Image (cartoon, helix red, strand yellow):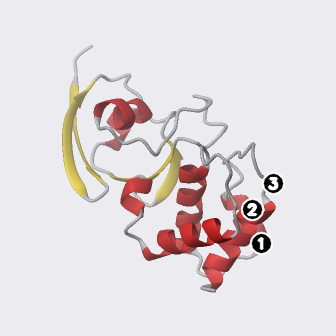
Amino acid sequence: MKPHTIHFKLNGEKVALAVEPNDVLLDVLRGGLGIKSPKVGCDRGDCGTCTVLMNGKSIRSCLALAVEADGTEIVTLEGANSRKCTRKLQAKFHEKNAFQCGYCAPGIILSATELLEKKSKPATHDIKEAIAGNLCRCTGYEPIVEAIAEAAKGK
């Protein structure tokens, strides 16, 4: 197969690199670009550990081909840390002890970031729907939902 050169913004920086047509975005981010927040989980899009934002929408990077990133803006947790709502979310997650192992944390934080950037006052059902594609095997979801709700309130 012939490599394709793709161009996109990654966490605010322009990136150009050659990828094979069947390269998966998750593998390119982790292996090719050294971005470690999207995790390898199920490789089927079920667990959400590989979540990134593409043009502001959360996607499962294990299901996206790298060529699909051409011309887009990709944000990982490393880049989202500069966003006020992401910092607020992280503080509330810490305060509520919402994570134990933290493996799912980047995906859940990015899903919650997308929600709060689109809806400043989400209802509980909005929060649950936003993180429904992110599995956490360590905690109950109650502290996660509470942390997102408090971040939205600005407490």
Work out how far the residue at label 3 is from the one at label 1, CA to CA, in angstroms.
Answer: 15 Å
**The N terminus is located in which quarter?**
top left
Residue 54 in view in this figure: no
Q: Which residue: 32% across, 38% down?
A: 34
Q: Which mark is residue 124?
A: 1
Q: Which mark is residue 140?
A: 3
| Placement of 61 over or under 11, stated as above or below | above
| Placement of 87 over or under 140, stated as above or below | below
Q: Which residue type does callout 1 highlight?
A: Thr
Give the crowd class for mark 3: few <14, some 14-19, many >=20 residues within 10 Å: few
> Of helix, strand and loop, which one carries label 2?
helix
Left or right of 88: which side holds 84?
Answer: left
In primary-sequence order, the first of circles 3 and 1 is 1
> Of helix, strand and loop, which one carries label 1?
helix
Q: Nearer the viewer, mark 3 or mark 1?
A: 3
x and y percentages locating residue 98 in the rendered image: 70, 61
Q: Which residue: 68% across, 51% down?
A: 100
| Placement of 92 over or under 16, stated as above or below | below
Q: Quadrant of residue 95?
A: bottom right
Q: Which residue type does callout 2 highlight?
A: Lys
Q: How many marks?
A: 3
Q: Which residue: 59% across, 64% down?
A: 112
Give the crowd class for mark 1: few <14, some 14-19, many >=20 residues within 10 Å: few
The one of 62 and 153 positioned closer to us in this rendering: 153
Please give the residue where the numbered disc 2 appears in the rendered image: 128
**The C terminus is located in which quarter?**
bottom right
Q: Which mark is residue 3?
A: none
| Placement of 61 over or under 44, stated as above or below | below
Q: Residue furthest top?
A: 1
